[in-house]
Each structure stands twice: as C-alpha cells, then as structure tokens.
Image (cartoon, rainbow, N blue to C red):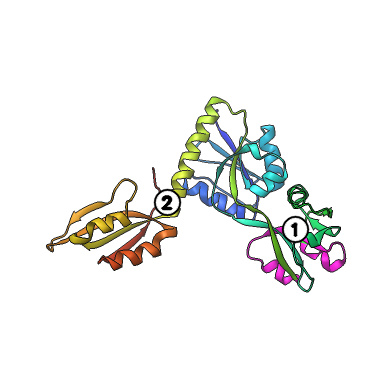
Amino acid sequence: MTNMIRLAIQKSGRLSEDSLNLIRECGISFLSSTYKLKTEATNFPLEILFLRDDDIPGYVQDGVADLGIVGQNVLIEAGLPALEVETLGFSKCRLSLAVPRGAEYNGVGDLAGKNIATSYPEILGRYLAGEGVKAQLHTISGSVEIAPSIGLADAICDIVSSGSTLLGNGLREVETVFRSEAVLIANQNLSAEKQELLDQLRFRMQAVRRARRNKYIILNAPVAALDQVKALLPGIKSPTVTKLAEEGWVSVQSVVNEDDFWHVTDQLKAVGAEGLLVLPIEKMIA
C-alpha cells in the first residue's frame, strides 16, 4: 500500500498491550510477535513499529513514524506536547514524590536542598520551581525506588500506578507532581493522504472510547413513570419506548454513562422500573 501510515507503540509492557487492544477494537487486524519490531495491518493501511517508549516522541517529531501512542509523561518530558492529538483514556498513572516511610514530611518545602532521584527531571524541575523549592535532582534511568536506601537520594519522583512498588521499597507517596494517561501523537507535517488516514483512525478510536464509557440498558416501566424514566435516561438523542403486552407498561431502551450507572439505577428502581438488563456496547458512533 503506497499510502500507508506508520504508528509507533511501546514494544513491551502494559502500555503496549493496551495499545494493541485498542487497535484491534478499531477493527484493524495484524499479526504480532515478541520477536518482531514491526508488523503490517491486513485490512487497513497501517504499519506498527515496536519501539522504546522514550524514543517514540522523537521518532514522530522527525517523521520516522507518522503517529505514536505514548504516555503523556514521556511526551512532556521530551518537550514535545504539541504532538498530542487525542487522549486515549487508558494506562493512567501519576508521577509522584515519595520519601522513606519513617522520614518526617510536612510539605514540599521540606525537600528544599535535598537530593531527589528521578527519571523525569524536566517535569519535576518545573513542579519544584512552581512551588519555590530548590533541590538537587539526580537523573537515573531505572530502579529509582532504590535510591534512598543506598544513600543516593533523600527522596524520589517516579511513576506510580498502585503504589505497591513504593511500599515494597520502604517508601511513601507524599505529593502528586503530574497525572498521565496514554495519548495519540502525530507528526505535524503529514501529507493530505496520511492526514485522512489519521482522521479515520481517530474516528474509530473515539467510537471505541465512547462504547467503553457507556452501557446499553433495557427496562420495563409503568407508563405513569415514563417522563421520570426519560429524564433519567436521555440517551444519545432520546430513549426508545415500546408498548408491552401488559396494559400500562412500556419497555425503555437507552444508553447510560458507566460513571452514573449505579446512581441512575437506584433512581430508576425508585420510580418503579423493573427487569433492568444491562449490556456492553461494542462501538458507539455519535
């Protein structure tokens, strides 16, 4: 395919798995292997490159790859926020400061003059400057959590998901410096053909994300409560209402946001709704 677009993703890890799952949910088929550094889709003009996450923003900036999926933390640390075109809603984490569990800590001001180990000196430096704190930053590329126990640093700043790694290394989280999630990035000089492919890919990703955030709900309700039910379940445009064989009752079909689901369900039951059936949505086109 002459008008193929190249997408770079992390070659291993949770972000890689989540990225590949999103591509598959977009209806794009491809063969993947732990030994291959690139693969081509069989039903969409897409080539996937498997790279180190730290390299992806630079590859996209330089046009080696047209697109990339990377954590916002990596993108901001590389100084290339302008490449971001779409937040993807997965691989959420935070960049946090942590100190030894037994250390006294009353606020970020306590870190003034201290040694802090991190893989994100740019993000941390801007955060500390904003707080008016001057500290010594030691940039290391991995195993940041070990730094306090070997005397390299008084504190660390690293990516946190569950916090279990910090606990396992005798540390406690004290400040959130930056919140991150996966983002789609793109070269800013795409050809018209590649821009069209990017638009198609974003359209599919957005449909998948809407589906993940919503549930399809079917219920029975008394006609007398229909206005209340419709107010609780406005749907995309309006709910579908069908008369039941039993006089005075209707079936209502609509869409409800995942975050509101349990609260709305309690309200629906309170106005007389019965037989609620909840189904996942595979794709949702607005």
**In the rendered image, the vertical position of residue 144 relative to residue 56, given as above or below:** below
**In the rendered image, the vertical position of residue 77 relative to residue 142, given as above or below:** above
Q: Which region shows up in magenta?
A: 145-170
Q: Nearer the viewer, mark 2 or mark 1?
A: 1
Viewport quadrant of the C terminus: top left
- Rounded to the nearest angstrom, the CA distance separating label 2 from label 1 is 35 Å
Answer whether residue 148 is magenta in the image. Answer: yes
Under mark 2, the amino acid is Ala
* x and y, in percent, of residue 248 in the image: 14, 62
Between discs 2 and 1, the one toward the N terminus: 1
* x and y, in percent, of residue 205 in the image: 49, 44
Give the left or right position of residue 188, taking residue 198 as reference: right
The residue that disc 1 covers is 157
Which is nearer the eye, 130 or 145? Answer: 130
Q: Which mark is residue 32?
A: none
Which is nearer the eye, 181 or 101? Answer: 101
Under mark 1, the amino acid is Cys
The residue that disc 2 covers is 211
* Neighbours of disc 1 within 10 Å: few (<14), some (14-19), many (20+): many
Q: Quadrant of residue 148?
A: bottom right
* x and y, in percent, of residue 274 in the image: 26, 67
At mark 1, the secondary structure is strand
Query: Residue visible at 78% across and 74% down?
Result: 102
Q: Quadrant of residue 82?
A: top right
Q: Residue furthest top?
A: 192
Residue 121 in sight:
yes
Query: Residue visible at 70% across and 65% down?
Result: 173
Kindly indicate whether the residue at mark 1 contacts the one at mark 2 (C-beta within 8 angstroms): no
Answer whether residue 209 is magenta in the image. Answer: no
